[in-house]
Amino acid sequence: MKVVLTYRVLQHWRAPVFRRLAESSEIDFIALHSRGFPGTPVVNGRDLSGFRHRELPTLRPLSWLPGSLETPIPFCPTLPLHLVRERPDVILAEGSSNLFNNLAVFAYARLTRTPVVWWTLGEIRSDQPLSGARRLFRWLGTALERRAAALLGYSSRALAYFARQGYPAERQFRAVNCVDTDRTREQIEKVAERVAPLRRELGLEDRRVLLFVGALAVSKRVEDLIAAYARLRERHPDLALLIVGEGAHRPALEAAAARLGLGARDVVFTGEVVDDVAAYFQLGDVFVLPGLGGLAISEAMVHGLPVLASEADGCEVDLVEEGRNGYLLTPGDRQGLEARLDELLSAPHRLDAMKAHSRWIIENRFNIDTYMESVVDALGYALTGRRQTPVPVWEASSPGPPSPKREQGDE
């Protein structure tokens, strides 16, 4: 089966999935992608070895418009020529975030009768009204989505969106967004000897650590975590906040911490960490994702961390089991975030049980193997019309470990 992936850029966290596809004896794989845009989140990873890929000449439509989209959507004018050259059996297309290129993809697909798998998070909920341009973009994305042979969603929330759109259940597949869990376990072992020195270097000895890992952007709502931490520190003086990541919003976050009287020993900013990030995850006691994101949730769970998340990319509804390995929060609810963190920090036995359950979920329900099964199944269905997994993997019969016991003082 010849599979061509069309993607905006090949981020470093997606590369392991593409390597897995390339390693399959049943798949001839190549990725076609843009050059990306330095200074934005739309950039290619540094290490793209292990699979065939081709970077295409790239334009940035609409960049001249006042208030243009925060995350640019690339356009690769030579994409149709490369599709003609590759002659794929199936096209695996990134969803609406690659809208301009998808117009070319579906035009080619219609002319050649090539099936397309639409790979998407579904939709992001927003309290902000849609502008005229965004309404047009959504309409175009939905129009293309309806023409896909198979719909591959990041989560159960994506499946709910597909159902609301009236798409046949037979065409729906779910690959819960996660990191390469096997590689993450290898990295945990690889950096084990670095953890203790790193803890000393960052001034975190004998301290419990709230952890955030991700790009420092407004959409991540890290200010909410800083504000909650400032109040928690009064009741938990041994607590520190570790923020791992870089981005244009970092100066604003540092200023917010300073206004709350938090020093460098309280809120530790590390900058971007990629290669040895497993060592930083091992410093944490609770992982918090206050805003958009997704992959970091599974990465934290491989490390055995409870997770507090608001609405991310949808995977949180599958990965976070309420009260068992974490909590789902309302976006912007700083009081709710503070209360849940206070609850966990005040009940160490419950925190330990949640850590164990995070690991159990990764080992038994959502990992790189179950992820790849769903991706390959969607590709096969698009080509043959036959599913290999009529019952979703997550409905396995195993009930999992018992829920953590609540003891007096937990609430």
Image (cartoon, rainbow, N blue to C red):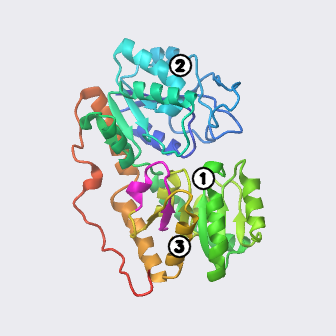
- In this view of the protein, which residue sits in the foreground, 65 or 407? 65
As drawn, 295 above or below 18? below
- In this view of the protein, which residue sits in the foreground, 144 or 334? 334
The reply to whether residue 236 is in sight is: no
Residue 203, position in %: x, y?
Answer: 72, 74
Q: Residues within 10 Å of mark 3 (few under 14, many from 20)?
A: some
Which residue is tagged 1?
Answer: 220
Which residue is tagged 3?
Answer: 339
Residue 278, position in %: x, y?
Answer: 57, 61
Indicate the secondary structure of the residue bearing disc 3.
Answer: helix
Q: Quadrant of the N terminus?
A: top left
**Residue name at image x 43 percent, y 42 percent:** 20
The quarter of the picture where residue 375 lies is top left
CA gap between label 2 and label 1 equals: 32 Å
- Give the amino acid type for the residue marked by disc 1 in the picture: Lys
Disc with the residue nearer the chain's start (2 vs 3): 2
Horizontally, residue 215 falls left or right of residue 184, namely right
Q: Residues within 10 Å of mark 1 (few under 14, many from 20)?
A: many
Horizontally, residue 27 falls left or right of residue 171, namely right
- Give the amino acid type for the residue marked by disc 2 in the picture: Leu
- The reply to whether the magenta stretch includes residue 296 is no
Pair 2/3: label in front: 3
**Residue name at image x 49 percent, y 82 percent:** 348
As drawn, 72 above or below 188? above
Magenta highlight range:
304-320
